[in-house]
Amino acid sequence: MPKRSKSFTYYFNYYLRYFLRKVLRFLLNTIYIRLRGNKRFYCKAIFEGWDFSVQSNGAVTCFCGEFGLEKPLGNVYRNTMEEIWRGEAYEKLRDAFRRNRLPLNYCSRCAGAVLLPKNQPYPAPAAFMETVHIETTILCNLDCSFCHREFIEEHRGGENLESDQVYRLLDEIIAHNTVKRLIWVGFGEPFLDKKLYEYTKYVKKARPEINISSSTNAIVFSHTDNARRLVQAGMDLLVVSIDGPNEEIYLKYRKGGNYRRALQGIKNLSEAKRQAGAKFPTLIWQYILFNWNDKDWMINQVVKTAQDAGVDILHFLPTFSPLSGISLKYIAKPYFGMIYRFSGPEHDYNPHNRAKVIDLFKK
């Protein structure tokens, strides 16, 4: 995707969000925690291994949304994941929490940072991680509005995590029975790395109980062969991002995309599952709610389109980025987003249990 010059609004939103996180962290560390005198901060990511993220340049962070603003905690080209997990950088973060301080600006908005009763002791760090995120590529076939690609490309350097290194990571994951989830995710389109199907098969053959998931804009799956390969690889869950009821609305955010091909990608995945007699991957259509795509008629149309396309779940997800695009209509709701379930109660996807769930399957 050729680079598109970003507007003043893009950079304003980027630096404003950085400033607001910094201010929020300060307020949480100084005023909020004093008001909650019987509570203290705790982090699931750095104590329980809830989110160990490997970027395409090998750098490791404790959250998957990092694009160069925080110092890496290590690099898998120099150390194993276990060495990094037990290393000095991670231990410094844990010490900050033990002193009741949020150590990173991102902590101010991370779902992994929670409150514990003050008299509850901190647990010893887990022996190894529970969830591993791996970004094998930052290549992308879209140029979404307000995506931080310029910063990401400058920070990551190379485009792909070397294949030999990926297999070393997977061997380490397979060797530790604490790992429950592997997520192929990052700031690129994961499936532009054509080896992702084989990586998934490799893990599933050795450890079929590990839940493997990813996200996509679905355009690559407009080719039926790619849809069949994904189903055959044994992936458990796939999140597909389409944010509009038609091409015009979709392109307001997904610049360079193609609504027709993305929708066809979802249909091909559903059909590939049907032909294979496969229950998985669970197909989740994620619709990010902005103030330009949150009208009632749009929501109703997308519900029908998603059901007809054969997805298992439709997730309407409000966002705070860009600030100028916030859907005030849905941010103000007592719940955070809506989840429509079409295929059955066994599909219990609901990140952080914050969304309103609406069942449309036959009971």
Image: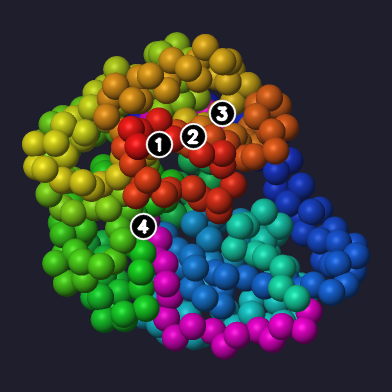
Residue 358 is tagged as: 2
The boundaries of the magenta stretch are: 118-146
Quadrant where the image shows the C terminus:
top left
Q: Locate residue 225: give its quadrant.
A: top left
Pointer 1 or 3: first along the chain: 3
Q: Residues within 10 Å of mark 2 (few under 14, many from 20)?
A: few
Q: Circle 3 is placed at which residue position?
A: 289
Instruction: Mark 1 vs mark 3: give the one in front.
Output: 1
Q: Is residue 317 visible?
A: no
Residue type highlighted by circle 1: Arg
342 falls in the magenta region: no
Q: Residues within 10 Å of mark 1 (few under 14, many from 20)?
A: many
Residue under the point 75% across and 76% down? 117
Pointer 3 or 4: first along the chain: 4
* Residue 188 image position (x, y, % from top left): 38, 44
Residue type highlighted by circle 4: Ile
Q: Locate residue 216: give its quadrant.
A: top left
Pointer 2 or 4: first along the chain: 4
Residue under the point 21% across and 33% down? 270
* Residue 89 image position (x, y, % from top left): 57, 79
Q: Residues within 10 Å of mark 4 (few under 14, many from 20)?
A: many
SS class of the residue under badge 1?
A: strand
Q: Circle 1 is placed at which residue position?
A: 341
Question: Marks 3 and 4, how far apart in space?
Answer: 23 Å
